[in-house]
Amino acid sequence: MTATEEPRSFVRGMRESGNGLLLRVSVIAAIGGLLFGYDTGVISGALLFIKTDLHAGTFEQQAIVSVLLLGAVLGAVISGYLADKISRRRTKVISGVVYVVGALGCAFSINAGMLIGFRFLLGLSVGTASFVSPLYIAEMSPPRVRGGLVSFNQLAITSGILLAYVVDFLLKDVPGNWRWMLGVAAIPGAVLAIGMLTVPHTPRWLMMTGQRDRARKTLEALREGDEDADVDQEIEDIEEANRKEGATSVRDLVAPKIRPLMVIGLSLALFQQLVGINTVIYYAPTILADTGLTSSSSITQTVFVGITNVVFTVVAVLLLDKVGRRKLLLTGVAGLTVALGVLAAYFWSPTLQQQAPYLALGGLLLYIASFAVGLGPVFWLMISEIFPTGIRSKAMSVSTVVNWGANFVVAATFLSLSTAITRQGTFVLYAVMSIVAFLVFATKVPETQGRSLEQIQAEVTETEGSR
Ligand code: BGC
């Protein structure tokens, strides 16, 4: 098996990989993240207009927002099966097509019920794209740049959120605006579907389905110009890992060898949401308005939150392969704890509110930057790395379901929690979650930087087996 690679910067690693195809397939696959992010960001702005236009009451408004999350849970379940059965690539083509239908359906909805139905359909596609994109990229990438390339997906998520904030802002005075806000998403959906038709299947999926020659050809194309690449060795490693693994089924998710890996995947999935990220993404304007800002300046400041999210995700893309996943993850979670402490102190102390009004925005920016360099990208990256090929798609699907489920619970309880235990109490609760997350990650999460997927598989199952 090939040795662990020396860490190097992402840009240098990409130059050494010398390959346009690798970059192209990663960018196209990452459009899945753009759909995910755009949808996450667009609805709060659009809802303001939908509610008057379609006469949607509170219940219907909540359903319009949250039915997407339920669709995403179901989408993640179905595509765990599809990604193995019909391939990662075709699953992503379908996800792009469903997204186009969903986005256009939303744009032309004539009543709340119809909109709710199409938002559910969109959710199916978003749940699929959310994990099949990192899965696809991880299976294409050489170890030295895998962290950065897989995190193109998180970069696309954060860019999608920012794009949605900007589109909402630009269209706020245009007649029929919410239809445009929801409808333009059909464009990246179509680009994803068509783009995925032009890229190859992943070598790991081809090997898993017994297509050795095609796998070899794809790897040769992907590694062309890379002086360190050894395609024969890679094929052999994949083959050997598959042989050791034997046939796998859903039941293997709880097999003694896989269970510890599921614990890692599921804790990352849960804590990524339990630290409260989407309360900030969905409710940043509400939080800022509570600090006494007018709605218009709180919307402007929300754009700062969106920009910070993108900028620090770029930092993560550049550093994950050099500094390693663990360091960024742990530093990021420590930063989250401090930021939540600042926010709690601010809302607790009237003196701070009077004398340091910018502390709330400062706390939010520190919070989002810390999430963006660590838990944001590392969750999606790690679940694409730690599981053996035969079980990878199913295990990622389960982790994704848990992530969307937790997202739903946190988003649905934030406002009532703020009333029940105060806003500062809610931030303290998220801070406690981030301390627990730190301890769990420090003891459980392995370093995966610079190793091939097959090496990681051998290493983690050995260490876990000997515990
Ligand atoms: C999370 C989303 C979140 C986004 C924010 C993603 O990694 O899964 O729930 O909205 O990051 O940037």
Image (cartoon, grey):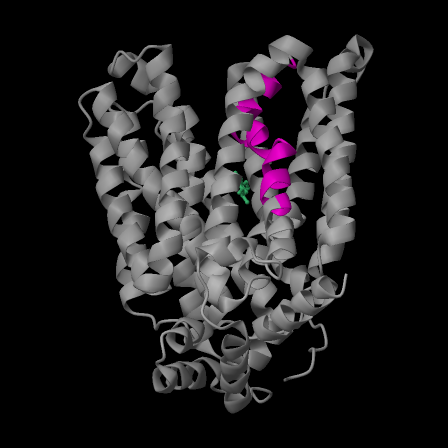
In magenta, the rendered stretch is 267-291
Image position of 256 with respect to 270: above or below:
below
Residue displayed at 82% across by 10% down:
351
Q: Position of residue 212 (x, y in %)?
A: 38, 84
Q: Quadrant of residue 272?
A: top right
* Quadrant for the C terminus in the image: bottom right
Q: Position of residue 53 (x, y in %)?
A: 25, 15
How many numbered badges does the structure rendering display?
0
Q: Residue at x 54, y 24 (%)?
A: 283
Q: Nearer the viewer, residue 25 or 60?
A: 60
Q: Position of residue 21 (x, y in %)?
A: 42, 75
The answer to whether residue 48 shows anywhere in this view is: no
Rendered residue at 57%/63% (across/down): 385
Work out whether 318 lies above or below 184: below
The quarter holding residue 84 reads bottom left
Q: Give how far across and how far down residue 91 sits, in percent.
A: 32, 57
- In which of the image's four quarters is ligand 1 placed? top right
**Residue at the image position 63 percent from the left and 46 percent from the top:** 268
**Majority secondary structure of magenta residues:** helix
Res. 82 visible in picture: yes
